[in-house]
Amino acid sequence: MNGSRITAVGHYQPAKVLTNEDLAALVDTSDEWIRSRVGIRTRHIAGPDEPVDELAAHAAAKALAGAGTAPEDIDLVLVATSTAVDRSPNMAARVAARLGIPHPAAMDVNVVCAGFTHALATADHTVRAGAARRALVIGADKMSEVADWTDRSTCVLVGDGAGAAVVEACPPGTGPGIGPVLWGSVPEMGHAVRIEGQPARFAQEGQSVYRWATTHLPPLARQTCERAGLAPEDLAAVVLHQANLRIIEPLAEKLGAVNAVVARDVTESGNTSAASIPLALSKLVEQGAVSGGDPVLLFGFGGNLSYAGQVVRCP
């Protein structure tokens, strides 16, 4: 009952990079228009032969290698995604098959942009309860596949990628490495962010999402810190869902994490939905912007107007 911790993270992005200038050749937009409204410069786009489970498996393999964990040591695989094409086998089972993980519990978690932090909390609770020893938690989305490439208000936002974390029980005598989750939703406003229809297409009510995120989420992020027994100024880093730089920066400022590095991976990756938080966290670790044991706030929000956050200790 000592809680769980993240022992390693990893990320993966497709090789193809789509610039704002490339988008200007597709729709009525420009580099200046995109940067001024959402802060994005580039995004990575997966090809037709790169399914979601392949993106997820690449990120997961990197996390496993970083943790020194063999596939057979994983007994729970959770994949947060909202862009799975098929209903079954689910993404978690497909990732487990790709990586050679035998006999895991394998589940997908669809909470769109807050999916990874929901999945991380689920893994934490499962390990605490003794129902799993080591979990592989992945956020992966192929947003380019559900984008309307004729709609300049949404197609400029999206990117593809995956991020992953290995979660295991804390050693005896150590404190928890994953703090208590704060999560919830606003179901009656679920229409504000949608991926629906045949074929499925991403759409959102941008102003509604912006107002909700910048007014309602800062106190919730502060409550997340309180649940972990920390003040915002104690944080070493803040990793919010990488939706839009105009949401990330005011939310971080209102939080009051004055000493924290604020992840701004959205500028080069776009909105990768459930992948955005583990992708950004993995890059901070890889770049040495955070050190082992540092407290980092993870806070996802978006689709379903759901949110979930926790403070974690950096691997």
Image: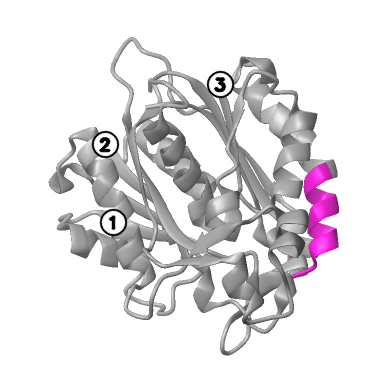
Magenta-tinted stretch: 204-214
Which comes before the other along the chain, label 2 or label 1?
A: 1
Question: Would you say 1 lies left or right of 256 here?
Answer: left
Q: How far apart are marks 1 and 3 (CA)?
A: 27 Å
Task: Name the foreground residue: 34 vs 209.
Answer: 34
Dot label at residue 58: 1
Amino acid found under the numbered disc labelled 2 = Arg
Asked where in the image residue 150 lies, by quadrant, the reply is bottom right
Q: How far apart are marks 2 and 3 (CA)?
A: 28 Å
Give the residue at mark 2. 133
Q: Count residues near mark 2 (Cα–Cα under 10 Å), then give few for <14, some for 14-19, many for 20+.
A: some
Q: Is 139 drawn above or below residue 219 in the view shown?
A: below
Q: Main secondary structure of the magenta part?
A: helix
- Left or right: 307 with respect to 127? right
**Circle number at residue 236:** 3
Quadrant of the rendered image containing residue 166: top left
Q: Is mark 3 on a helix, strand or loop?
A: loop
Residue 246 at x, y percent in the picture? 76, 48
Give the residue displayed 49% in from the left and 43% down from the top. Answer: 280
- Determine if the magenta segment contains residue 53: no
Q: Can residue 132 be seen in this view?
A: no
Q: How crowded is mark 1: few (under 14 residues within 10 Å), some or many (20 or more)?
A: many
Q: Are marks 2 and 3 in contact (CB under 8 Å)?
A: no
Q: Disc 3 marks which amino acid?
A: Ala
> Who's the residue at 33% across and 23% down the image?
170
109 w.r.t. 298: above or below:
below
Looking at the rendered structure, the kind of residue marked 1 is: His
Look at 74% across and 71% down and name the residue there. Answer: 153
In this view, the mark in front (2 or 3) = 3
